[in-house]
Image: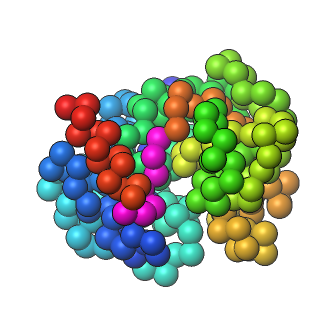
Amino acid sequence: MVKTLILIPSRMAATRLPGKPLLKINNLSIISHVFKRAEEADIGEVVVATEDQEILEDVLNNGGKAILTNKKHKTGTDRIFEAYKKLDIKNVDYILNLQGDEPDINKNDIINLNNFMINHNAEFGTMGAKIKDNKMLNNKNVVKVVVENKLEENNFPRALNFTRENLSTDSQNIYHHIGIYSYKMSVLEEFVSLVQTSNEKKNKLEQLRALDNKLKINVALASSSPIGVDTEEDYLAIKKIMEYKI
């Protein structure tokens, strides 16, 4: 039986919207919404990895699991690796890294990525969604992934690049990158041992470190593009959407 552990890195000190993990939607914090979506996927244990006592307490008070980590981590992947070591959970095959600022992520996308990883014996995977608004191509806050083949429901092609740059509609096989990653344990250990590359630092995209070091990243098709909360406008938009669903 393949064993997956879901870890959600989260911290208060976001550059553009400090304190965003504890902003409320339907009387529940963003980070606790993400935890509950991950738990609903029912693919393995879920734990929030955070440097902040406030986040830890919020998750615990809402019935979740959380662990405190070092404040000096440069990336979310470093944070989840420390959490994995501290938790000391045995026989983990895959770690799924779920971003803590996408409270409306589809639980089926979490399930599908995990299934793709297992069925393809893949080492490193993520997701991309179809871009329905061409304005996203020119928005540097939207991370795009370029893949070798068109994404279909049943394929799992390789990522060629990740970028924030402006792209044209003429470019082939571009998708909105969704903030969810799955790693085989051996690959996660290798990845966190690698030095940050200049490409990664320039673009503020840690997945570029993997490509720069010839690690293979496969991409699955996501059902939709969840709104990542990076700004006050993002928060108000996702709050309106999620409160309307109730």
Reply above or below: 19 against 233.
below
Q: Residue at x 22, y 55 (%)?
A: 24
Q: Residue at x 58, y 59 (%)?
A: 141
> Residue lying furthest top in this view?
154
Locate residue 90, reporting x and y percent: 46, 47
Q: Is residue 216 visible?
A: no
In this rendering, position of residue 199 left or right of residue 53: right
Reply above or below: 113 against 137.
above
Locate residue 45, reporting x and y percent: 37, 41
Which of the 4 image quarters holds residue 177?
A: top right
- Closer to the camera, 132 or 51? 132
Which of the 4 image quarters holds residue 149?
A: top right
Q: Is residue 76 visible?
A: yes
Q: Residue at x 37, y 63 (%)?
A: 232
Q: Residue at x 32, y 54 (%)?
A: 236
The way the protein has been coloured in the rendering is rainbow
Q: Which stretch is magenta? A: 226-232
* Quadrant including the C terminus: top left
Reply above or below: 214 against 152.
below
Which of the 4 image quarters holds residue 128?
A: top right
- Closer to the camera, 232 or 216? 232
Dominant SS of magenta comes to loop
Locate residue 160, reporting x and y percent: 82, 46
- Closer to the camera, 202 or 195? 202
